[in-house]
Image (cartoon, rainbow, N blue to C red):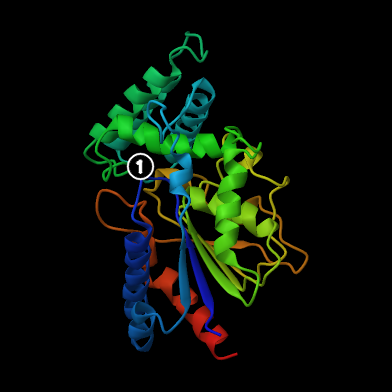
Amino acid sequence: MKPRLVFVHGIGGPRDAEAEGDEWLRALADGARRAGQTRHVSALIDGWASETRFAYYGDLFKKAGAQGAFGPQGADDEAVIAELLLEAISDHLADPVLSVQEKRVLLHAQAQLAPAGRSQGLGNVGRRTLNALTTLMSAPGLRWFGGIASSQLTLTILGQVARYLNRGESDAAGAPLDRRIRERVAGYLGQDGPTVVVAHSLGTVVALEALHEHKGDVPLFVTLGSPLGMRTTVLPRTRPQPMGTPETVGRWLNFWDRDDVIAARPMLEDFVRPNTSGVGPVSDRVDSDGFWVHPAAKYLAHPAVAGPVVEALDTLAGQ
């Protein structure tokens, strides 16, 4: 039996799951090439190295007949987005290598989100958040949102984080959105044989929670651009509490880029408890070029990311 490789995507609009899975796999192969593991490149692309699955759940965010059907569905969601941005801005302001221009933009966006002397109620939080996003996106030296067309679209995409963490939107059977997403991902994990899991962005939260309920062997869990460390928005809302490493995980590698707004407070080992085998996350920084560093494919193309994934698949194939 070939080892199983499961990709778990994060925030974003509707997507072609097959095409994106192929993009991730080719990026992983590129990273393997850069890591000097050229013998694995063809095996990855042609599907010899693993049974690769792309765990797609994005369609579950579609709410029939709702305005902005993929984005925030109310004031509670908008409040979480504002909290998320405020925390990300605060953490990035602590960066000692921040340029004067970057600091000026961040402070302006911070003031727009939480204006001094004004009520912080929910009434105009959506407008304040849009204004702050517009500020962040207009800065030539700030690379957080360079790949997204507009502040409204960014708000829509970030709304998916809020909708998952708010644990609402139950279907006719009473299953909330977050449970339906985890069940979808669990179906890709399977129960037979070992599975290497590579999760990105919101997908790291989904995968972590799903793996706490998973019974199969996961020799390697890789998280990319993860928001799990966001102490006011994500960390306290993640389940189960306190946050810990799933028992089934044999190794956890966490990768982050300093320009990735979603990966604020990236050193997960500082607050994630190890499992009973002593396994906890090990974080490592990688740096990408360009104006939009958050995409999974950029992370996967790094040799530091691709190398351990390919090595794990190779080891499993030889067992």
Quadrant containing the C terminus is bottom right
Q: Where the N terminus falls, by quadrant?
A: bottom right
From the top left corner, tell me how far across and down residue 71 is, in percent.
42, 33
> Residue at coordinates 69% horizontally, 60% vertically from top-left?
246
Q: Residue at x 48, y 74 (%)?
A: 309
Q: Position of residue 92 (x, y in %)?
A: 43, 40
Among all residues in the image, which is located at the extreme right? Answer: 276
Instruction: From the top left corner, tell me how far across and down residue 200 is, in percent.
Output: 46, 55
Q: Amino acid at mark 1?
A: Leu
User: From where the camera sits, is residue 111 visible?
Assistant: no
Mark 1 lies on a secondary structure that is loop
Q: Nearer the viewer, residue 229 or 18?
A: 18
In the image, is residue 69 above or below residue 35?
above
Query: Along the horizontal axis of the image, is 32 left or right of 219?
Result: left
| Residue closest to the far front | 172
Q: Quadrant of residue 184?
A: bottom right
Task: Say if 263 sits above or below 314 in the image.
Answer: above
The correct choice, above or below, for 288 with respect to 127 in the image is below
Residue at the extreme bottom of the image, as rendered: 318
Q: Position of residue 183 (x, y in %)?
A: 60, 53
In this rendering, position of residue 13 left or right of residue 181: left
At 42% across and 72% down in the image, what residue appears? Answer: 306
Total numbered badges shown on the rendered structure: 1
Q: Is residue 90 left or right of residue 211?
A: left
Label 1 environment density (alpha carbons within 10 Å; few <14, some 14–19, many ≥20): few
In the rendered image, which residue does mark 1 sit on? 98
Q: Is residue 303 visible?
A: yes
Q: Nearer the viewer, residue 281 or 220?
A: 220
- Residue placed at 32% from the left, 34% from the top? 153
